[in-house]
Amino acid sequence: MISQTDGRADKKNTCFAWYGNALATSMAWPVIRVKTLMNEDIIEKLRTIVGVSNVLTGDQKVDRSAIWRTNQPCIAKAIVRPSCTAEVSAVMKACHEQRQTVVPYGGMTNLVLGAVTTPDDIALSFERMNEIENIDRTSQTMTVQSGVTMQDAQERAEAEGLYFPVDIGARANCMLGGNVSTNAGGTRVIRYGMIRESVLGIEAVLADGTVISSMNRFLKNNSGFDLKQLFIGSEGVLGLITRLVFRLRIKPQSHNVALVACDDYDQVIGLLNKARASLGNSLSGFEVMWDNFFHVVVQPNGRLPSPIDTAYKFYIIMEATGVDAATDDEVFESTLTQMFESELVADGVIAKSDAEREAIWAIRHDVDWIVGDAFDFDISLPVADIFEYTEAINVALKKDIEGIDVVTFGHLGDNNLHISVQCDGAKTTHAHTIERHIYETLKPYGGAISAEHGIGLEKKEWLPISRSEAEIELMRTLKRSMDPRNILNPGKVISME
Ligand SMILES: Cc1cc2nc3c(=O)[nH]c(=O)nc-3n(C[C@H](O)[C@H](O)[C@H](O)COP(=O)(O)OP(=O)(O)OC[C@H]3O[C@@H](n4cnc5c(N)ncnc54)[C@H](O)[C@@H]3O)c2cc1C
C-alpha cells in the first residue's frame, strides 16, 4: 500500500520551493491517509526508543533548516535524536518494519541538497552522539561517536600533542559522521589526503537496524573486504555511521605560510611543481584564488586588508608544516627566494607570526558571501587544463546569461576548482543553463562533477558525465542489497529506477 517515495525526490533542482511544489502535486490523497494513520504509530514507537524529549515534532523543528544558511524550516515528520548506536539500531529496526524513510542529519553544512527531507521522512540527527571516547597516543588513534564536530576533534587531538589533519571552513558546525559520509576534503588534502585516508574503522547501522562494527585500529588490515569504504562518501544512502576510529598525526612543529601573486597560469603551474619538488611532503596547502575572488574579498571592495599589491591575475597561498622548526623555516624561505629569482612569482609575502598566518588564511576562508548568494560548483580536472576550462565556461556563460559573474578559486594542488556563479536567478531561472555549461564543458577533460562536496540531489542528474552506466548500475546493486526497501536517504546520489 505504501508507495516508494524515491520518485518524488528524483528531480534535480536547487530550488527548495520547487521541490516542495513537486511534492504537493505528486501526493495522491489515499496515500496520505494511509501514511497519516501509520505516522502516529511510528512517532510513538520512536518516543519509546529515544525518549519523548528526543523526538521533535511541530514547532520544535521549525528552526532546523535542511539547507545551509537558509531559513527554510525543517519539513520532516519528526527529528529523532538518538544517543547511542543501540538506539540508532532500534530506530532503524522500527522504521524498516514500517517502510519509514530516514534522512541522516549531521552538521547540515553540505552544499548539495544532501539531507533535504519531505514531510514523509524522519530526520535522524546525530547531535547527541558527540562523545570523544578515546585517544590512544601510542597508536595515534581517536575513537569518536559520529556527532562530534570537526573542530572538537581538532582541539582535542591538539591538547594531546597530536593532530587531526583534515580541515574545512565549516569545521565548527560539521560533524565527523557527515564529513566521512561526504568524504570531506579541505585545504590539506595535498599532504594528508581526503578524510578517507584518516579513517581506520567505522561502525554503521544498516537500513534494517543491523549493526556493522568494523572498528579497525590498524594501518594494515587486509582481513577480507574493507567494508568501511562502503560508507565513506556514500552520503548516508547505504548506512548510518555511528562511531569512527581516526588515524591522528604528529603535531607539526613548524608552520610556514606565504601569499604570492602570479601574472599568468603557466607561472602558477611552475610554482606548484617547484613547491612540490623543494618542499616535498611538508607542502600542506596550495590554494589558488583568481583575481575575481581576491578583489571581492580584499579592500577596497572587500573587508580584509591585502598584504600584497592587488594588481595581479592569480594569488596563491602556500603552506608547509614539518617537525623541525629551524630547518623547515630556512627551506621555506630559500624556496620562496628561488621562486622570485626564477620569476615564477611577481610579488609575495611570508607570514612571520600566527596573526599574520591567520590574516592570510582569512582571505581564502572568507567565503560566506559566496555560499550565501551564489550557485556554487566544486569540480576536478587536470591541473594543466584548469585555465583553459575557466576561459571556456566564462565565454559560454557570458554569451547565454547577461550580467553574470564567475568567481574561481580552489585547492589547485588537488585538481579541485571551486566556481561560484552569480546573477539574478542563478539558482532558479538560469540554473539548468549554468549547470549545463559547467558540467558539459568538463567532458573533454575527463573531469569530475564533484571534487569534494558530493552529489546529493543537486548533482544527481549530471552523474553520468563522471560515471559510466555500469558504475551507476553497480551503485544501484549495492543500494538494493543493503537497503532493499529504499528507506535510507532515498533519492540522493542515484535514482533507483
Ligand atoms: C563554509 C563552508 C565551507 C566548506 N568547505 C568545505 C571544504 O573545504 N571541503 C569539503 O569537502 N566540504 C566543504 N564544505 C561542505 C560540507 O561542510 C562538507 O560536505 C561536510 O563534510 C558535511 O558535514 P556535515 O556534518 O555538515 O554533514 P551533513 O550536511 O549533515 O550531511 C552530509 C551528508 O551526509 C549524510 N550524513 C550525515 N551524517 C551522517 C551519518 N552519521 N551517517 C550517514 N550519513 C550521514 C547526510 O544525510 C548528507 O547526505 C563546506 C561547507 C561550508 C558551509
Image (cartoon, rainbow, N blue to C red):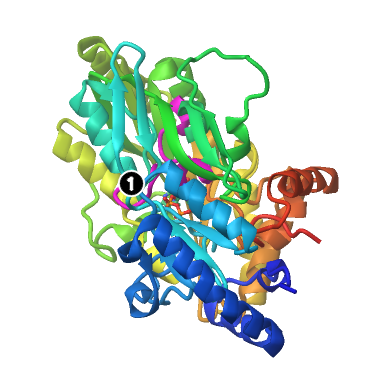
Quadrant for the C terminus in the image: bottom right
Front in this rendered view, residue 413 or 496? 496
Q: Quadrant of residue 59?
A: bottom left
Q: In x, y percent, where is residue 356?
A: 18, 39
Eyeballing the image, is 156 above or below 147? Answer: above
CB at mark 1 closer than 8 A to ligand 1? no
Q: Nearer the viewer, residue 100 or 75?
A: 100
Q: Quadrant of the N terminus?
A: bottom right
Does residue 90 sit above or below 438 in this rendering? above
Three-letter amino acid code at disc 1? Arg
**In the shown orientation, is residue 140 left or right of residue 482?**
left
Tell me the magenta residue range: 171-192
The residue indicated by pointer 1 is: 171
Q: Residues within 10 Å of mark 1 (few under 14, many from 20)?
A: many
Residue at the image point whose x is 57% and y is 46% from the top: 209
Q: How many marks?
A: 1
Residue 447 drawn at (x, y percent): 69, 45
What residue sits 55% from the left and 60% below the top?
A: 102
Task: Place residue 329 in its image quadrant.
Answer: top left
| In the image, residue 307 above or below residue 117 | above
Relative placement, left or right, of 383 versus 465 is left
Up the image or down, 174 lies above or below 220; here it is below
Considering every residue shown, the one lying at the far right of the view is 470
